[in-house]
Image (cartoon, rainbow, N blue to C red):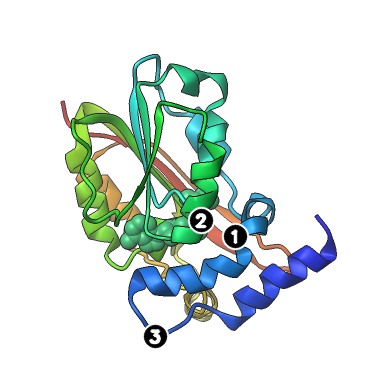
Amino acid sequence: MSILRDASILLQLAKGMPREGSHADRLRRFYAPQAQHYDAFRERLLHGRRELIARLPLGPGARVVELGAGTGRNVEFFGERRAEFASIELVDVCTPLLAIARERFSQDTNVKVIETTAEQYQPNEPVDCVYFCYSLSMMANWAAAVGNAVRMLKPGGHIAVVDFYLPDGARRLPIPLAKFWKQWFARDGVHLSDQLLIYLQCQSRTLYVHEGHIRIPYLPVLSAPYMMYVGQRAA
Ligand SMILES: C[S@@+](CC[C@H](N)C(=O)[O-])C[C@H]1O[C@@H](n2cnc3c(N)ncnc32)[C@H](O)[C@@H]1O
């Protein structure tokens, strides 16, 4: 990717998320200027998405929902197995990113793009898996979105999340560093929580947790905390 393309995204990130308007409107204005280059830049920022998706035990006939799906890039991480899924529903509120998802999957009859909130959406029938990639931290009410996701699942279905967060317990960051990350991300509408992982573990049976740090493009030295989670709805 050229430095000029990076510069246009970095400028938008530096300007931050607009503060006025509805949640969907602020997301639209934030992402519209970035939409065409979104995937290439996020490839270097949003780590762990491919790994998370590789961990999902989904076979032919599976019904899958992604909440906060953006451009739909993550669906490609399923590779060839996605053609055998019964349905893949991509939910988001951001019109310019969804336009890219619609174009991307215009030939895929099992992929449906839906413009509504993750807190509200319910599929027509229970699904095998719901996942969130770096979207919960941008949701106005992430706990409601997790609750809604669990309600979509068949008994034994999987919920999976990869996102920035604040580690708790023994991994807790020194207060100034935690404050730095909270403020740094908040400018772009990303709200880090030290309750996210524990909440997921309360809402589902834990199958897999990974907690680590990610290098941020153009930010020397510091690495941001992120986590991956896979859980299962009680049978
Ligand atoms: C950082 S982007 C991640 C997009 C995609 N999951 C990815 O991995 O590239 C966060 C996404 O969450 C969406 N989002 C934020 N709040 C939402 C909500 N309440 N309901 C649905 N989507 C939401 C945004 O519009 C945006 O597309």
Graded by Cα atoms within 10 Å as few (under 14), some (14 to 19) or many (20 or more), the crowding at tag 2 reads many
- Whether residue 58 is situated above or below residue 111 in the rendered picture: above
Which kind of residue does numbered mark 1 sit on? Ala
160 relative position to 177: left or right: left
- Whether residue 86 is situated above or below residue 182 in the rendered picture: above
Q: Residue 162's spot in the image, x, y percent?
A: 46, 48
Residue position marked by numbered label 2 in the rendering: 97
Which kind of residue does numbered mark 2 sit on? Leu
Place residue 223 in its image quadrant. Answer: bottom right
Residue position marked by numbered label 1 in the rendering: 35
Res. 27 visible in picture = yes
Residue position marked by numbered label 3 in the rendering: 20
Farthest bottom residue?
20
Element class at badge 1: helix
Element class at badge 2: helix
Place residue 122 in its image quadrant. Answer: top left
Residue at 40% over, 26% down = 110
- Whether residue 145 is situated above or below residue 16 in the rendered picture: above
Which kind of residue does numbered mark 3 sit on? Glu
Q: Are the two marked residues, 2 and 3, in contact with CB atoms closer than 8 angstroms?
A: no
Q: Are the two marked residues, 1 and 2, in contact with CB atoms closer than 8 angstroms?
A: yes
- For label 2, being within 8 Å of ligand 1 is answered yes
Q: Of callouts 2 and 3, which one flags the residue occurring earlier in the amino acid sequence?
A: 3
Q: Look at the image and tell me in which quarter the N terminus lies.
A: bottom right
Ligand 1's image quarter is bottom left
Graded by Cα atoms within 10 Å as few (under 14), some (14 to 19) or many (20 or more), the crowding at tag 1 reads some
Report, in whole angstroms, how far the alpha carbon at label 2 lies from the one at label 3.
20 Å
